[in-house]
Image (cartoon, coloured by chain):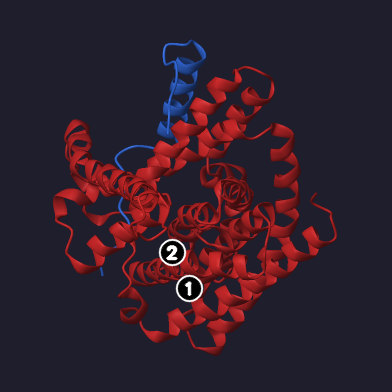
Chain colours: A blue, B red
Amino acid sequence: MESPTRKLAFNADAAAILIALTFAALIRLNIIHHITW
Amino acid sequence: MSAQTIPFPTAARQPPRSQQLLALIPGTLLLFAIGLAGKALESLGIFLRAHHHYFPRIEYVLWAIILGLFLSNLFTIPAIFRPGIATYELWLKLGIVLVAAKFVFADVLHIGAMSLVLVAIELALSLTVMTILGRIFGLPPKLTSLLAIGSSICGVTAIMAAQPAIDSDEEDTTTAIAAILALGALALFTFPLIGHALHMGQQAYGVWAGLAVDNTAEATVTGALYGDLAGRIAILAKTARSSFIGFVVLGYAVYWASQGQAARVERKALFLWQKFPKFILGFMALSILASVGFFSAGQLSSLGNLSKWAFLPAFAGVGLRTQLRDLVTQGWRPILVGVLGEIFIALITLGMVLAVYHHGAAQ
């Protein structure tokens, strides 16, 4: 049986933290002014 | 949720990293397309109802899941999309880390600590009951261990963390994962109905969803389907539950090693750290920054909105990876053990949550 999940080519935890903190820094520095929903 | 610990026999010669990352693009675009279609359908519904036309009152969360379920269960998703669909895990974790901006750290500690106490009770009861059910229905012992770990802690993540630790068969692992995913899909549709029938508050329902629904993705969706606050509280409770993963997997690894059926764990502290879901550290860090006034109110609102954008493809991924046919093709015994165990866990956690909130301990 094929496994229903796949291995990612990168560490999702580290990538998630890195992307989140990068966006947080960009927003804090007002480089990104406003994100709407 | 994480797939990092599954050994792949064919992984001896992997393509270059750049090629692996390029392969993620089609599936990732599909996730976003489905998520955006879900959001567009919600907006279309609001517009049509405002102009006195009928359209189902369904939120984007459920639309994204329905569209994903529809595609993956009625059609065969081409192989080119599969690597990218796995990135739903990244978007889910990104959404969880970002949603921390909407929490005051004192609330994280308060609700998290309360959840930890409830999780400890839930763990002890659910591991025991699943083990008994597995024996009653004659499941292979390691499949029983995997189902017990998956249903008590963190679904797929816990099962995949346990697979190398207890040296279980690939087939047992696949069966356990398929059963847990299929049961998670059932929770999506039943929990909100029960919550509304019992007139549960957002916080109580969120804690219940976080404690009872196995996978972080499904727990997040099950909470979000009830309301924005319920979704965030479900993430918090689920995160507290996930933090136990290392201890439970270590316990099973030590047990199976003592039976001579798995390798001995030499460095237990390192083992615990390796199994610990690291994105929780990002969640804590952002919550602390948000609580000490590092961001303005507008910036916190932007981070909260960004978390919703991150959850959009994650919700689509929940639908896409759920194969409802697994409910019948995995054999009736693992599914029956899973269903009975899940009903038990849902009732026990519901009872605990209602007791805590009824007595005002969590107010």
Tag 2's secondary structure? Answer: loop
Identify the residue shown where x is 21% and y is 53%. Answer: B10
Q: Nearer the viewer, residue B104 or A18?
A: B104
Instruction: Please give the residue where the numbered disc 2 appears in the rendered image.
Output: B167
Q: Does the rendering let one see residue B110?
A: yes
How many labels were placed on the picture? 2
Identify the residue shown where x is 52% and y is 56%. Answer: B219
Label 1 neighbourhood size at 10 Å, few (<14), some (14-19), many (20+)?
many
Q: Does the rendering let one see residue B260?
A: no
Which-is-in-front pick, marks 1 and 2?
A: 1
User: Badge 2 sits on which subunit?
Assistant: B
Residue B335 placement (x, y as % from top left)? 44, 79
- Residue B80, placed above or below residue B96: below
Identify the residue shown where x is 49% and y is 26%. Answer: B302
Three-letter amino acid code at the position of disc 1: Lys
- Residue B205, placed above or below residue B180: above
Please report whichever mark, 1 or 2, sits nearer to the chain's N-terminal start.
Answer: 1
Label 2 neighbourhood size at 10 Å, few (<14), some (14-19), many (20+)?
some
Instruction: Please give the residue where the numbered disc 1 appears in the rendered image.
Output: B142
Tag 1's secondary structure? Answer: helix
